[in-house]
Image: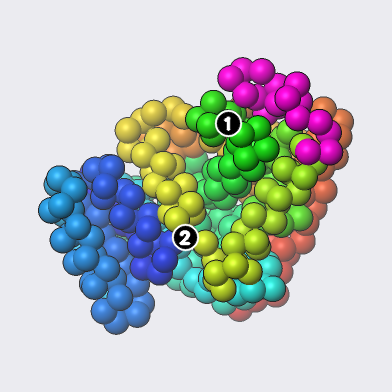
Amino acid sequence: MKITVVGAGAVGATCADNIARRELAEEVVLLDIKEGLSEGKGLDMLQASTLLDCDVKITGSSNNYELTANSDVVVITSGLPRKPGMTREELIGTNANIVKGVTENILKYSPDAIFVIISNPMDTMTYLALKSSGLPKNRIIGMGGILDSARFKTYLSLALNCSPNDLQGTVIGGHGDTTMIPLTRLATYSGVPVGQFLDAETLQKVAADTMVGGATLTKLIGTSAWYAPGAAGAILVESIVRDQKRVFPCCVYLEGEYGQSDICLGVPVVIGRNGWEKIVDFELNDEEKAAFNKSADAVRNMNDVLKTLEL
């Protein structure tokens, strides 16, 4: 098993580190355009692995795509990170060219790879990767819903004063501050609906905090978060390489599911060795369906911007 992470910034390096610590592959390749960055971080991780009993070959390289040959899974984190006050959508022009170029270069050496997209704006970058690559839809997966759901569970656990391990909570829709949909109705605490423990006002605040979870961190630390995004990417990779069949909310291509077509959007899917293998129908109520359709409209507007770019 060989896994490549493209982008050795904070998110990419954290994702690669998690992948190595979990020993998800015999070889991990870390790639970045900045000279020395991936080599340095890769060497640092390799040295750390001697202390953690991890037996993984870790290689860093500055833009040498030949080293990525025959990768089973490729994680794309490349692009500019968010700054305070910046939306994910404002990154589209720069990051679209980067993601398209990375996808094309990877496919020269790993035509059978499964792609995990983390770059923002993630829904549109996932759509771009799918359309520009011509790959089967199951091999392009956007990570965002896993991260959003982790934030949802975090705020729920704080409100309930309980372990997040006893919670189930899912966020669907777009990976944006105004497009994600925390499904408070379906969230459970040890199998019991959280609505039996929290009043409507508290649940509304949990949902609101979840939606601005990324922006909150960007404001506090001055750039995009990396620990949770990197971990989210790694557990998605783990379900692929270990064929775990876990159900995660991921950004995938819809062809009529959830009432939407020709769009990549966050829905619950089964993740296994073939990529995403099945879309799970959560049977949304009318209010949730309306929110999902509104989210789709916003993401579709972002996708339309791709038509105005020289890619």
At horizontal 65% and vertical 32% (from top left) the residue drawn is 160
- What is the magenta range? 186-202
User: In front of the other: label 1 or label 2?
Assistant: 1
Q: Dot 1 corresponds to which residue?
A: 162
- From this view, report whether residue 223 is shown above or below residue 272: below
Q: Is residue 198 magenta?
A: yes
| Spot occupied by residue 39 in the image (x, y as percentages of width and height) | 23, 72
Q: Looking at the image, which residue is at 35% across and 62% down?
A: 13
Label of residue 94 in the image: none
Between 185 and 253, the one nearer to me in the picture: 185
Residue sitting at x 30%, y 75%: 37
Residue at the extreme bottom of the image, as rendered: 35
3D distance between C-alphas at marks 1 and 2: 24 Å
Q: Amino acid at mark 1?
A: Cys
Mark 2 element type: loop
Return the x and y of residue 276 as percentages of the image width and height: 49, 36
Quarter of the picture containing the C terminus is bottom right
Provide residue 298's location: percent of width, then percent of height: 78, 56
